[in-house]
Image (spheres, grey):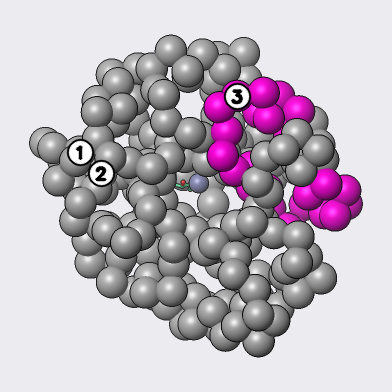
Amino acid sequence: MKKISVSFLSSKNIAEDLTLLDHTDADFIHVDVMDGKLVKNKSLPFREMKHIHKYTKKRLDVHLMVENPSKYIPLYAELNVEYITFHIETEEDVMKNLNLIRDYSVRCGLALYPDTPVKSLIPYLPYLDVILIMSVVPGEGGQEFIPSTEQKLVELHSLLQSYGLNVSVNVDGGVNDETSKKCRYADILTSGTYILSGESYQDKITSLR
Ligand code: DX5
Ligand code: ZN
């Protein structure tokens, strides 16, 4: 059964939605962090985001869409965090940042833009706990799932198999009960708009597993 990570990027009332989600069997809360540089939008500053624990007891799946992960990793590592994932496309030293996350005993991951090939992960594969495949161009919620993601997941699956590695694969963006069928090789599905637009968040979550 797939794990579900719920993004609250498109939430109109974060406190209320997180409280409701706490009563579902969602596995993680997906925290989208945007700096207005790597992606054009900006998310809440950390001084506000850090209060998230008041509304949720779920473990956090932090997605850093930022140019300087090294500035954000120490902040988010202090929260109730399961994964910290940053983009392979940043200018910073990827290996250094993976080690920085691991120094906090947090699981680490790399995220890939839709156009970035899976082979770019090869040097880092043995060090990864999770790989985040973006199925939309990062930066905003409510976009449509890019169809070529299906083929990319197949490629990633065979790449991991050829190295004999068992790294979790998370798919993020435009995931709903239709597009989730294209994610056979994913272990975790991240979804925001689809889950939060329903009457019952639990029913939506169940439909994705
Ligand atoms: C996109 C974000 C995603 C997104 C998921 O930049 O990283 O986490 O908000 O939400 P939906 O399901 O609305 O695409
Ligand atoms: Zn995300």
- Nearer-N-terminus badge (1/2): 2
Question: Which residue, given by chain and number where applicable, does mark 3 sit on?
Answer: 79
- Whether pointer 1 and pointer 2 mark residues with C-beta atoms closer than 8 Å, the reply is yes
Q: Earlier in the sequence, mark 3 or mark 2?
A: 3
If the image is split into quadrants, where does the C terminus sit? Answer: bottom left
**Figure check: 123 above or below 158:** above
Q: Does the magenta stretch include residue 81?
A: yes
Which mark is drawn over residue 151?
none
Pointer 1 residue: 201
Question: In this view, which residue lies farthest toward the left?
Answer: 199
Could you tell me residue 64's position as x and y percent?
63, 41
Q: Earlier in the sequence, mark 3 or mark 1?
A: 3
Chain part drawn in magenta: 73-99
Task: Tell me, yes or no, if residue 14 can be seen here.
Answer: no
Give x and y (percent) for residue 15: 35, 17
Identify which amino acid the numbered label 3 is placed on: Leu
Separation of residues labelled 1 and 2 (CA atoms): 6 Å
Residue at 19% across, 41% down: 202
Q: To which quarter of the image does residue 130 belong?
A: bottom right
Q: Which amino acid type is marked by label 2? A: Ile
Tag 1's secondary structure?
A: helix
Q: In this view, does 14 lie to the left or right of 67?
A: left
Q: Nearer the viewer, mark 3 or mark 1?
A: 3
- Residue 195 tag number: 2
Asked if 195 appears above or below 162 in the picture, the reply is above
- Circles 3 and 2, Cβ within 8 Å, touching? The answer is no
| Residue type for callout 1 | Tyr
